[in-house]
Image (spheres, grey):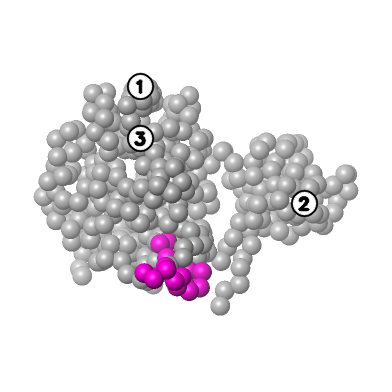
Amino acid sequence: MSFNKNKSKIPELVMGIRNLASLKACKQHADAAYFSLDRLSLRSRAQEITIEKLASFVEEIHNKGMKGYLAVNSVIYPHNLHELDEVLECAVCANVDAVIAWDPATIVKAAEKDLKIHISTQANVSNQMTAEFYRSLGASRVVLARELNIEQIKKIKEDTKIEIEVFVHGAVCQAISGRCYLSAYLLGKSGNCGECSQPCRWEWSLHSDNGAVVDIEGKYLMSAKDLCMIEYIPELIEAGVDAFKVEGRLRNPGYTSTVSECYRQALDLFRDEMYEKSIIIPLKEKMALEYNRGFSTGFYFGYPGPDDLAYDFDMNASPIKREAIGVVTNYYPKMSAAAVKLLENGLNVGDHIIIEGNTTYIEQKVTSIFHEGEKIIGIGKGNEIGLEVQEVVRKNDRVFRINRTKTE
């Protein structure tokens, strides 16, 4: 396939973030960030950004030269309508660049407040007539259904005047455009209200018609691999895609940093007419070291098959694993040291650690440990230690050790 690179517009790179730490992680690479409040979103566990903090958070995004998109994409029930008004009014005051929505109540109310509207993938927009319908309601962009192939996306773009955004990387839901009811039925936690407990990632048993249990050797029958389209950026650009979206509102800042950097490099290589698979494959391999369930191209080149399911992995296929160690209880700036309570595991000099919080993300090696005034080389869990740190940390930041598992 040949590509007219001179006429191709480089898509906007939109990263999912959850707090200031993940915003800082992608500020040099992303064009825009999308995020949730602690309500009315499909990521109810993302609690760091409240209504009270929204304006200052959006200001931070704008100060970094990025656009900020607020996801208000949960189901809206009668009792949510007053809260919806409050959220959207705060969005106006905070100068968010767009609201991501699909529930008609959110769309109508956002339009009444002259907010820019991006239609969420939850709306399952799968053809140009539907895209034009949402444009008639005031939407400026649609995030297309994840079940479309590249030729269908190209056709939609040719026959509509609305901007087109697609997911290029991250977790994939088993249900159509994420409209899943499995968690609600099994556990009373609705994925459509942001409470998905991810039962599709569980280890399931397979039963035959006669009641016998089929031995499946501990396979994860319903767990889809993560989407990764970094090898096919030219095809997506040729299809006319206006924005690339990366799932990740619950991912750690290290993931956000690596993935945003790799896609930025790939887009810049395309822009500079230097995009080659020999350069892209190492970027994909770099991303595979971050949390992932294996990689797939989803529906872009046809229906997914058995190779697109993560049968063998509970959650993380990466050889790099995070092990919880403890929590920061104090920081001493003059000594560049932190007090750390070792709640889950011990710690040794030479360990590779991550210290992470709402505004903190540090990767470093442990260079020195102090316990009861003495310098030591290692200590078990249950103790409180002094730890030399390379940057500012904060009370309640979490400490993790990074381990590399053996691979065949």
Give residue 271's mark.
Answer: none
Q: Which of the marked residues, 3 or 1, is nearer the chain's N terminus?
A: 3
Q: Amino acid at mark 2?
A: Lys
C-alpha span from label 2 to label 3: 41 Å
Q: Quadrant where the C terminus lies?
A: bottom right
Taken as a whole, is the magenta stretch helix, strand or loop? Answer: loop
Give residue 82's mark.
Answer: 1
- Which residue is disc 2 drawn over? 381
Q: Which of the marked residues, 2 or 3, is nearer the chain's N terminus?
A: 3
How many numbered circles are shown?
Answer: 3
- Residue placed most toward the observer, 245 or 267: 245
Q: Is residue 238 visible?
A: no
- Which residue is disc 3 drawn over? 72
Q: Which residues are magenta?
A: 207-223
**Badge 3: residue crowd in 10 Å (few <14, some 14–19, many ≥20):** many
Q: Is 163 situated above or below 323?
A: above
Q: Which of the marked residues, 1 or 2, is nearer the chain's N terminus?
A: 1
Q: Find residue 31 and report its horizontal and vertical position in percent.
A: 37, 44
Q: Is 143 situated above or below 174?
A: above
Q: Is 337 situated above or below 263?
A: above
Point 24% across, 33% down: residue: 104
C-alpha span from label 1 to label 2: 47 Å
Membership of 225 in magenta stretch: no
Q: Amino acid at mark 3?
A: Val
Q: Amino acid at mark 1?
A: His
Q: Secondary structure at mark 2?
A: loop
Q: Secondary structure at mark 1?
A: helix
Q: Secondary structure at mark 3?
A: loop
Point 46% across, 65% down: residue: 205
Q: Find residue 345 and report its horizontal and vertical position in percent.
A: 73, 53
Membership of 216 in magenta stretch: yes
Is label 3 or label 1 in front?
Answer: 1
